[in-house]
Amino acid sequence: MKTSLRLVLSIATVAVVTAKAETRNRADIPAQYKWDFTPIFANWDAWEEGLKQMQAKMDAYAALKGTLAKGPEAVLRAYKLSDEIGQLQYRVYCYTSLQRDIDTRDNVMNGRLQRVQAVFARFGTATAWFAPELLTIPQATVEKWIADTSALTPYRFPITEAYRQAKHVLDEKGERLISLSSQLGQTPGAAFTELSTSDIKFPKIKLSDGREVTLTPGAYQQLLYTERNQADRTKAWEAYYQTYAANINTYAAIYNGVLQGDWYHTQARNYTTTLEAALDGNAIPTSVVETLVSATRAGTAPLQRYIKLRKKLLGLETYHIYDNFVPIFHVEKKLPYEEAKKIVLDSVAPLGAD
């Protein structure tokens, strides 16, 4: 079963990476190869209405401040409303961000996405009261409410998690201050995205057979998986990463911004290390990661043997990281996209329609 699944996935990968669009003009691409956004919202007017509904629900949520101690129904009301807001947030955000992904240089779409992000940030500030207020109620009291109120049962986990992390929850003023930094904290990631997608200029190289290839991420991956000539893989690797290395100091500054943001939240929430802060949300001890790292370092021998075997079977004098992707056995067959799609869908059909 595992071998068959790997084979299907390998075929699908080859089919995807060998398929080339005849045009890069989106208007000329058939509809079946483009995202359909209408299941999220029918149009931008419907999106605007969804944004209004979300804001109204956010105002209603903020109005619940000071009510939680009244009993289980009050806590239930807050969690159910939070679910409703979350569903709208997901739709409002995805409808905008996916359309922005079509062309990250579209400033109209960038503006819409920033509107959504600003609304999310305001919601974080307006609801900074919730966790501190919940934690003023004794945990035993809330657990009894859950036991006596069946509708609260689905929320047992997030409620108990709030108490587990109580020592890292600040008072309302502290939580509000942290919420105000949310958009600031997204700035390094946004800068990275713009530099790496909107403003980047991908290089063009000439392969040994005379073909010219513009090394977009998709074309680069295709070349690594299909190009049998190591010299061409080397040329592609060096040209592709030199594109990023040309901005190495900017990337370093962006990464420093990420690290400083992590350190800020670590200190603000009274964690000892950034690793502890990153793992605590999933209740994972730092020893798990530390053990994984040490075990990996101590157990590289099988990987080294595998690499040596690949080097031998590929007939290479030297072996590099960009040689990890090309299949050991050369297969000429290329599947049309529709046929490859059918194979993949058939392979997961036993899992059911969902």
Image (cartoon, grey):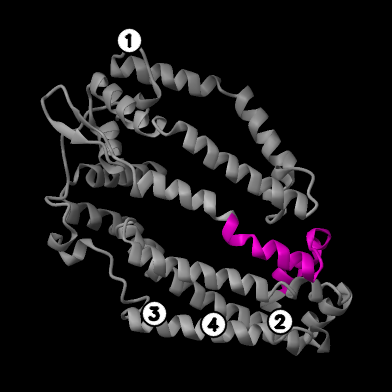
Identify residue type, mark 4. Gln
Q: Distance between the residues labelled 2 and 3?
A: 31 Å
Q: Distance between the residues labelled 4 and 3?
A: 12 Å
| 322 relative to 127, above or below | above
Tag shown at residue 152: 2
Residue at numbered disc 3: 47
Which badge, 3 or 1, comes first in the chain's sequence? 3
From the viewer's perspective, tell me whether residue 32 is left or right of residue 307: left
Which badge, 4 or 3, comes first in the chain's sequence? 3
Identify residue type, mark 1. Glu
* Of the pair 347 and 182, the residue shown nearer to us: 182
At 19% from the left and 65% from the top, the residue drawn is: 32
Identify residue type, mark 2. Leu
Q: Do the residues labelled 4 and 1 touch (CB within 8 Å)?
A: no
* Of the pair 276 and 319, the residue shown nearer to us: 276
At 29% from the left and 54% from the top, the residue drawn is: 344
**Quarter of the figure with the C terminus:** bottom left
At 28% from the left and 70% from the top, the residue drawn is: 36
**Residue 74 x/y as whole percent:** 74, 88
| 288 relative to 227, above or below | below
Mark 4 or mark 1, whichever is nearer to me: 4
Residue at numbered disc 1: 317
From the viewer's perspective, tell me whether residue 279 is left or right of residue 8: right
Which badge, 4 or 1, comes first in the chain's sequence? 4
At 12% from the left and 30% from the top, the residue drawn is: 211
Q: Can residue 261 be seen in this view?
A: yes
Q: Distance between the residues labelled 4 and 2?
A: 25 Å
Q: Distance between the residues labelled 4 and 1?
A: 63 Å
Tag shown at residue 55: 4
